[in-house]
Image (cartoon, coloured by chain):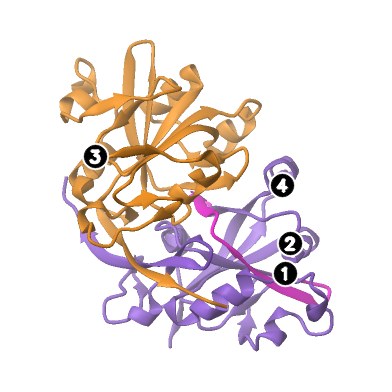
Chain colours: A orange, B purple
């Protein structure tokens, strides 16, 4: 595996095709990770993204306290992890002593510019600072806007600003539907107008 | 082809997997359609969606004037149309006399609750009213929030709240990357935690 930095001007391309993501955050010794299908790029430069984080999630409190969060883009080989993370809440009693990362033995590594841990085995990561002055969007729409301050990708499937999954089916990203059903990112289609 | 109504509580599932969409709008005898990769569901009930509409687009003026817009979900068989619509602006002189729909001979049919025309050949359609009180999001982030007031899908690939593309490769939805490159929605993956 080789994790390489992604130019911030290309960070939107990590989410442009609409994959499900895992949002991680940490604050004051606590950390958590949750699934979020509702995410999208919001701007190119400075790179911004939008993600919906429900009020009931444990991760939300950590994001509000830390002012930062990470977007982890999981892949096929992590499909079980995506369901584990997405179908459990960090608020459950079973995670009181050992958090989700520990309980599910999820390997993480450190962010470079924020506190949130990054999930190993993903194919892309965006470190984000929660945009100031967006309290109304957070309260009214559960909408969090992040400025991307660092971005990384697994160069086996993303390099020079492009995804290339051919030959790496287990590293294809996932698109969530509902009830444990996903689509894998499919064939490349190149179109000339 | 059989277009059937989608329950509004399931409307989010039309966008949940992150497809590129075409946004159409109409006002006072003018109409237009544009591509938008940056879209996502925002709420279940009432069903809301969010989409980024740049200030430079012709469609934006129509949306602001009409207060409504339609999300059309295109598919593989329309890939050329997606590029035509996405790489041209309704503001171009060539569309002064005949709009994009006429110039590209795009077949449309009428919405049921709003003014915007719907593009035939797509696999899903969401008729939206632009949410009131969101001027700041529109101005600051080019972010439009729509309440879904009607939703339809091609029942060959979406029924009972689920996509089922098997056997209909030309009706698979598209995920945009950049520069004319897309992914088709791929294989189904079902996961039990």
Total residue callouts: 4
Instruction: State the residue at coordinates (41%, 23%).
Output: A112
Residue located beneath label 1 in the image: B89
Measure how far apart labels 1 and 4 are at the Cα level. Answer: 19 Å
Residue A114, position in %: x, y? 44, 22
Q: Which mark is residue B57?
A: 2
Mark toward the viewer: 1 or 4: 1
Mark toward the viewer: 3 or 4: 3
Residue located beneath label 3 in the image: A121
Residue A5, position in %: x, y? 41, 37
* Position of B181 relative to A122 (above/below): below
Mark earlier in primary sequence (2, 4): 2
Considering the numbered disc 2 on the image, is that residue within a helix, a strand or a loop? loop
Q: Is residue B39 magenta?
A: yes
| Subunit under mark 2 | B
Measure how far apart labels 3 and 1 are at the Cα level. Answer: 41 Å
SS majority, magenta: strand
Q: Are marks 2 and 1 in contact (CB under 8 Å)?
A: yes
Q: Which span is picked out in magenta?
A: B25-46
Residue A106, position in %: x, y? 20, 30
| Subunit under mark 3 | A
Q: Quadrant of residue B127?
A: bottom right
Q: Is residue A192 visible?
A: yes
Measure how far apart labels 2 and 4 are at the Cα level. Answer: 13 Å
Instruction: State the residue at coordinates (61%, 45%).
Output: A43
Q: Which mark is residue B138?
A: 4
């Amino acid at each position: 595996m080789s994790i390489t930095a992604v130019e911030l001007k290309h960070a939107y391309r990590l989410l442009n095709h609409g994959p499900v993501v895992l949002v991680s955050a940490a604050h004051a010794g606590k950390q958590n990770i949750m699934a979020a299908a509702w995410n999208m790029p919001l701007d190119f430069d400075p790179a911004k993204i939008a993600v919906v984080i429900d009020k009931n999630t444990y991760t939300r409190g950590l994001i509000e306290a830390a002012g930062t969060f990470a977007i982890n883009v999981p892949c096929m080989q992590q499909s079980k992890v995506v369901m584990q993370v997405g179908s459990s809440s960090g608020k459950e009693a079973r995670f009181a002593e050992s958090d989700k990362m520990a309980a599910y033995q999820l390997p993480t590594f450190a962010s470079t510019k924020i506190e949130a841990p990054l999930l190993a085995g993903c194919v892309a990561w965006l470190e984000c600072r929660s945009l100031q002055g967006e309290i109304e969007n957070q309260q009214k729409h559960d909408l969090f806007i992040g400025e991307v301050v660092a971005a990384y990708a697994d160069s086996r499937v993303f390099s020079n600003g492009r995804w290339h999954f051919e030959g790496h089916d287990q590293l294809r990203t996932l698109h969530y539907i509902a009830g444990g059903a996903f689509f894998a990112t499919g064939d490349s289609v190149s179109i000339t107008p």
